[in-house]
């Protein structure tokens, strides 16, 4: 069964060999899908079994949100309100979510995660990575990963997020438990392992121990790095060949150089910096140095409760000094690189049929029309997953 998305005014392919500029823009185009794959990018007016006429609208790859914590229960609005009134961000609030998540039933957690997934899809996201980290023991971490697997194949065991309340006097004991009990229960349900390397969270030796164990279990590596201050997180990520170092808000010149000369993607999470009143990362500096940059939401109840990639694009352009084209690439191809995937984040034959159709003549409107709901239709794996009612 073939589907053609026809009469596209501006098509962003992210394939410079196929069209104009770094985004590979093709005008008056059609995209032909068969099942869950793109099979051709053509001139408008192609025949297929089914036809979706977008009437000159703009079509682009779905957003790849490569950093989320979508599976959780509980509400932490009061912490956000307090921060907006001047309080500092503290990592200790994570335990509030751990308690609520552990108490929630599978059905309740599933319903909450699905609501957030649908919310993300309705603003153009077609793929998410989902981390655990609100279970903190073998049973609860594996349960959260099992629920995450219902929504994505990019699941991440966030082994070191926070030390559970009953073990605060023995963080090294907790690290041993993660390596010898929790990791074996979670590795079969994960593609990635992640650690929170930060003052107030875990030190570099603890992080290295857990990443080494994760790698031995066959998982790819990710690091929450340099969010709240300068530190060893980025160096560790690059040294260990992690796919991404996430946050990168406080970087030294050596960190920037290390990222630029490595395969480790700098994943920037500007909605978290917004929600915690932190300074923003210097996206411009990273791009000018030659680093690969991804943008993601970091959707979580403590420091960034948003699923909106358009909001992240807006912040990236306004506050991280990225061009709209750079921000758009970071939110699609950059996310795919952070997940080491070639099948998403672009529109070309063989790629997964993940696309978004805008109620706008060009992709610039995603940033220019601040906060406007421009997503008309979203296709995930060749199927319409969201369609705005007229
Ligand atoms: Zn995170």
Image (cartoon, rainbow, N blue to C red):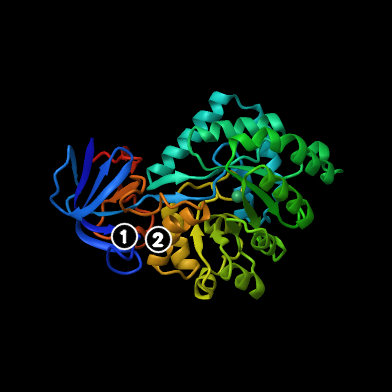
Q: Mark 2 — residue?
A: 328
Q: Is residue 134 above or below residue 327?
A: above
Q: Where is mark 1, residue-wise? A: 363
Label 1 SS: loop
In the rendered image, the quadrant that contains the C terminus is top left
Mark 2 to mark 1 CA distance (whole Å): 8 Å
Position in image of residue 34 (x %, y %): 27, 40
The spot of residue 285 in percent (x, y) is 54, 74
Residue 323 figure quarter = bottom left
Question: Does the residue at mark 2 contact the one at mark 1 (Cβ under 8 Å)?
Answer: yes
Quadrant, the N terminus? top left
Residue plotted at (55% across, 31% down): 147
Q: Quadrant of residue 327?
A: bottom left
Locate residue 228: give its quadrant: bottom right
Tag of residue 322: none
Classify residue 320 as left or right of residue 9: right
Secondary element at image label 2: helix
Q: Name the spot of residue 58 as percent of width and height, x first.
A: 26, 55
Label 2 vs 1, first from the N-terminus: 2
Question: Residue 38, image x and y in percent?
Answer: 30, 47
Residue 121 as seen in the image, left or right of residue 193:
left
Depth check: 176 or 218 in front? 218
Q: Nearer the viewer, residue 376 or 37?
A: 37
């Amino acid at each position: 069964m073939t589907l053609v998305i026809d009469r596209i005014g501006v098509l962003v392919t992210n394939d410079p060999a196929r069209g104009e500029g770094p985004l590979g823009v093709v005008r008056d185009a059609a995209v032909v899908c068969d099942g869950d794959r793109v099979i051709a990018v053509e001139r408008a007016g192609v025949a297929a079994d089914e036809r979706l006429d977008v009437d000159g609208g703009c079509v682009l790859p779905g957003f790849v949100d490569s950093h989320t914590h979508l599976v959780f229960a509980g509400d932490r609005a009061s912490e956000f309100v307090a921060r907006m009134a001047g309080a500092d961000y503290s990592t200790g609030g994570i335990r509030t979510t751990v308690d609520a998540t552990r108490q929630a039933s599978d059905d309740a957690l599933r319903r909450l995660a699905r609501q957030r997934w649908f919310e993300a899809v309705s603003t153009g996201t077609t793929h998410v990575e989902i981390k655990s980290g609100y279970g903190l023991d073998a049973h609860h971490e594996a349960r959260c990963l099992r629920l995450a697997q219902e929504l994505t194949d990019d699941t991440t065991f966030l082994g070191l997020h926070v030390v559970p309340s009953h073990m605060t006097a023995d963080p090294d004991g907790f690290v041993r438990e993660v390596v010898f009990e929790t990791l074996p229960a979670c590795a079969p349900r994960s593609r990635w392992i992640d650690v929170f390397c930060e003052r107030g969270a875990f030190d570099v030796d603890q992080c290295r121990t857990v990443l080494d164990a994760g790698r031995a279990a066959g998982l790819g590596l990710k690091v929450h790095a340099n969010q709240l201050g300068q530190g060893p997180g980025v160096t560790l990520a690059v040294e260990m060949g992690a796919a991404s170092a996430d946050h990168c808000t406080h970087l030294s010149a050596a960190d920037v150089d290390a990222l630029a000369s490595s395969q480790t993607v700098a994943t920037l999470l500007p909605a978290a910096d917004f929600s915690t009143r932190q300074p923003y990362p210097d996206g411009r500096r990273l791009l000018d140095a030659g680093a690969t940059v991804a943008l993601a939401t970091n959707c979580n109840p403590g420091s960034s409760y948003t699923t909106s990639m358009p909001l992240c694009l807006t912040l990236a352009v306004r506050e991280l000094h990225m061009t709209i084209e750079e921000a758009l690439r970071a939110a699609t191809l950059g996310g795919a690189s952070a997940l080491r995937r070639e099948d998403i984040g672009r529109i070309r034959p063989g790629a997964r049929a993940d696309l978004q159709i805008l109620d706008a003549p060009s992709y610039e409107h995603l940033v220019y029309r601040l906060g406007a709901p421009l997503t008309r239709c979203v296709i995930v794996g060749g199927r319409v997953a969201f369609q705005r009612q007229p």
